[in-house]
Amino acid sequence: MEGLKSFHEHLRNLRSQAEKLIHAGLALNPLFAEEEIRLKREDEASKLRAAYGTIAEKLKELRGIEASASYGHSRAESILFLTGLAAKAIFSKGNRASAVKDYLIREASDRKQPFGLVMVSIGPRGLPDDVEVVSISQLARESGQPESEIVHKLQQHGHLFFGEETFSLLIDRLITDIREGRLHLPISGDKLAQIMGLKRPKSSIKVVPVE
């Protein structure tokens, strides 16, 4: 009997310890939930940082391409100018020389092309999956349309445009809001427009000449 009483006492102790562990586990549940939320927010913040890194590299790449294109265009214009001077010297004075001069001036004007406008474009699906770098100048050259018209048409399809500095500030702000629980991914284009106080279609573009 003594052994049986000892056994029951042991069971009671085990039960008491189990109940304490259950209560301790229940008390920890909110902490686990908070940590899960924190980790999820950090994961989303990391995705935004990664997206910004990719975009920054692409901006650098396209700006380099634009600089090369501008340099090549300038060289071509210089060659044409020198050719024009040579032609002017060869032709005799009079109407023929004047006609050549007018032709060269007209041709130079027709070939004037935009260079250097590279922007971050965020589409309707927003961040982080619908963002890319667009060379507005290249699209303008290829289509023969003004840069402002290119931007306007893309805005009509729900695209938002940002310069590098503004985009960087936007990402910093979004990361802070995500960490503090005010936002979560994905962030739609409409939400971004609301955050930035933009009304579509609208764009504030500053063309920076390629050096």
Image (cartoon, rainbow, N blue to C red):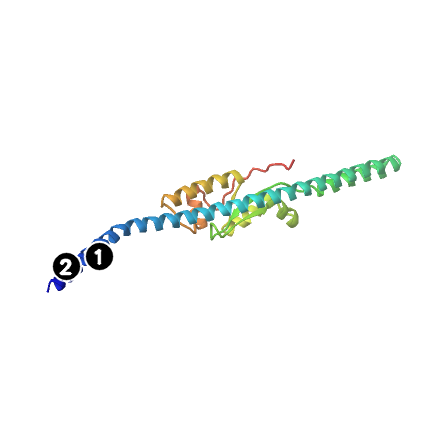
Query: Secondary structure beneath disc 2?
Result: helix
In the displayed structure, 210 sits above or below 156; it is: above
The residue indicated by pointer 2 is 9
For the residue marked with disc 2, what is the amino acid? Glu
Structural distance between the alpha carbons of marks 2 and 1: 14 Å
Please indicate, yes or no, whether residue 160 appears anywhere in the rendered image: no
Residue at screen point 34% across, 48% down: 35
- Residue 129 position in % (x across, y down): 49, 52
Tell me residue 93's x, y (percent).
Answer: 87, 34
Disc ID at residue 18: 1
Q: In the image, is 162 to the left or to the right of 63?
A: left
Residue 64 is situated, as x and y percent measured from the top left of the image, at 64, 42
Neighbours of disc 1 within 10 Å: few (<14), some (14-19), many (20+): few
Of residue 93 and residue 159, the one placed in the foreground of this image is: 159
Closer to the eye: label 2 or 1:
2
Amino acid at pointer 1: Ala
Say which residue appears at 45% left-offset and 44% top-offset.
199
Instruction: Write the residue at 14% across / 63% down.
Output: 3
Determine whether, in the image, residue 15 is placed left or right of residue 96.
left
Report x, y in % for residue 144. Answer: 65, 48
SS assignment at label 1: helix
Image point 13% across, 64% down: which residue?
A: 4
